[in-house]
Image (cartoon, helix red, strand yellow):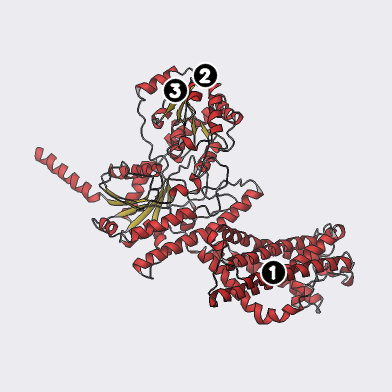
Amino acid sequence: MRQTMLVTMVLMVLLSAASAMNVVFYINAIGKSHLDFSDSLVDSLVDKGHTVDVIIARMNDQVTGQGKSKAERFFVFGFKNGSDWNKMHHLTNTFEEREFPINGFRPYTLIGNNLCEIALNDPKLYEFLSYRKYDIGIVSTFDYCGVGILKQTGIPSVTTFNAVPIMPIQTVTIGLPNAASQNLPLFYTFDLSTLYGRFWNLISWTYINLIQIPTLKKEQELLFRKRYGNDFNIEETVRKVDITFINSNEVMEKPRPLHHRIQYIGGINLRNPNPVDQKLDKLLFRSGNGTIIFSFGTQVPGRAYPRYAVKNFLNVFKKYPGYTFLWKYDVQPGEEEMFEEAKNIVLLDWLPQTDLLYDPRVIGFISHVGLNSFNEASYAGKPIIAIPLFADQPHNALNGVARGTTYMLNKAQLTEENIEKGLRAILFDKSYQKNAKRLQKMLVEKPAQPKERFVQWMEYAAANPGLHNVFELPGARMGIIEYYCIDAIFVSLLGVVLGLYSVVKKENPEISKDRFIMWVEFAPAANPGLHKTIRLPGVEMINENHQQVIIGLIYSIVALLVFPFYIPIIYALYVNKELNENISYKLINFLNIGDFLQSVNHILTGIFIIFPIFTKRINPIVRIIGYTANTLWTSSFVIIAILALTRLGITFFRIKSNKWALWMKILLFFGSLYIFVIWIIGCINLNFELFGVAWAYDMTVVYTDILSPLEFYFCFPILVLSFTSYILIIGNI
């Protein structure tokens, strides 16, 4: 009997060893909470009998240690002289109200690139990876470095994870649709119910798709090619990621299009609560009506709080003596007496947040709503006063507001009135407590709990390498033009234009193609019956001349399609200090601004053509706008010519690229003066020649005869050069 049991035990051990995986983690340590989240993933696998090793890339050198996980081996590397993490946008002036800049991720990518170069040149890292044969690797993805390193070492399956909600680096790489009308990039807070919010969200996604992610891929591909040769392709490498795990939960997250490669595991790092210690138990017991805990996590020290806000919190809390407030806060010099007066406020250097949130005597939580804090409060069924400070915190707060569990305060408007409104909401509006308990029930009862989901998908990916081939979306291999059907839209518009041209050409053979496109004159009285040829039902109330309506629509639609593309390029050049100081790029931006204004003028032109009432009521303004559009077209050639000469000077005369030479200033002055003179004279001339009020878009720019030969001999090749500069912009920003 004993022999049978012994044999059975040996077989079980052998089978367990045979099915156990060797796993390696590559963790970008950007915050303590991120390391804590990674620990929970490691322990989930170790508890199932798998062997786990951990590599920690210390992006933030303020994150010390190697975590508290049960991993077997660790390898930690970072910057010898420290990183620039403390200069990050979100850590400077934490309580100042400001939008996350469109290029706000650039500091992250620069630190990531520098750290990636260190990793690629560290032989000890590769020695660590060669210690054992790994079945699967998993990388925290704020860039592509970890994925590239693990794939190059021959690990058959690579997955990724994030300690924050889903980021553009995942959705764009996988090929998930990111409709600007519905989906915000993480860290952005535009109101998509407004035109303003949707417009800037469209610009942000355009920047992410055309500049941010392509730039990151190019820069990191160059780093890898230094080690692995010119055949290394970052695109093909990142497409081989099998599964991506996200620290979100379907019940709490905004609905969005997803895919099998995305697996939500939000809440996996939550631990079981313990009873509070004797000291805290006494504090909770003495509170007559309940206790509210107040914590901003580990990244916001007491000195970062605005002094007025601290005073306002104190004044509000003192109004509610029946409640106890446990506040994680380090008192600053000069504040001691102020806190002595508040008998219902208890200051703590540290508080066991999980244990307190699950205690029934705690009835509310004031928080920055970092994702871990938001998850803990939601699973504990506690209402929240959210004061989001940076990063993913506004995103989390808005999710809480949408679920009815959270009252959100503006971090820059922490007045007594606003704080008290929030406090009264979670204390006396029963809907917050009710919604918090309802959300708690949904989270606890949700099928496919995060720990089981994570372990099962990791085991499945390790047993079936190459899942990316099965799960790959077509959009992952499409360019912007294909993905958004820009080529199909262009062909459709071209077909409409050619169709209209053929109709007009048939009716009036004297109208040439060039005249139709650029200098169309409308004279309905001279073409009786023209409306029968081109008839749009129901437009008589707008304009009896249907030909004008069609041309006006073409002007407006084409201009509307073109001008949004200039905005991210103009902005990107403006905010990039290195490029903004470069003379060539500065001139290119002048050209971009001119083209953008020209597009806006053409939109207005289309409106004027469709609605002739404008030419009757504000005829001088209409003429000025039309003439301005033509002058801007002429000015493009002037700027291009100056740009070409400037580039030649920089290239052949070794002039500094960020210093204006005297001859450059003279060229720019006379070029600008020339453009201004022809514009002002033309505007005056047009409005004093007393043309009729009918629209006539035949506003020839005066004093431009000297440019005619230049347009043919000089400006056409420079236009080609200018177009190439757009490619350079996208590649070098």
Mark 1 or 2, nearer chain start: 2
Judge from the rendering whether residue 70 lies leftward or rightward of residue 317; answer left or right: left
Q: Is residue 453 above or below residue 218?
A: above
Q: Amino acid at mark 3?
A: Arg
* Residue 273 in view of the camera: yes
Depth check, mark 1 against mark 3: the one in front is 1
Depth check, mark 3 against mark 2: the one in front is 2
Q: Which residue is mark 3?
A: 361
Q: Which residue is mark 1?
A: 669
The x and y percentages for residue 228 are: 34, 67
Q: Nearer the viewer, residue 477 or 348?
A: 348
Identify the residue at the far front of this view.
Answer: 662
* Residue 467 in view of the camera: no
Residue depicted at 43% across the width and 44% down the height? 247
Q: Secondary structure at mark 3?
A: loop
Judge from the rendering whether residue 251 lies leftward or rightward of residue 52; answer left or right: right
Mark 1 or 3, nearer chain start: 3
Residue 693 lies in quadrant: bottom right
Residue depicted at 87% across the width and 59% down the height? 616
Q: Is residue 642 above or below residue 83?
A: below
The x and y percentages for residue 481 are: 56, 65
Depth check, mark 1 against mark 2: the one in front is 1
Judge from the rendering whether residue 70 lies leftward or rightward of residue 409; answer left or right: left
Q: Which residue is mark 2?
A: 321
Residue 268 lies in quadrant: top left
Q: Amino acid at mark 1?
A: Phe
Q: Quadrant of the N terminus?
A: top left
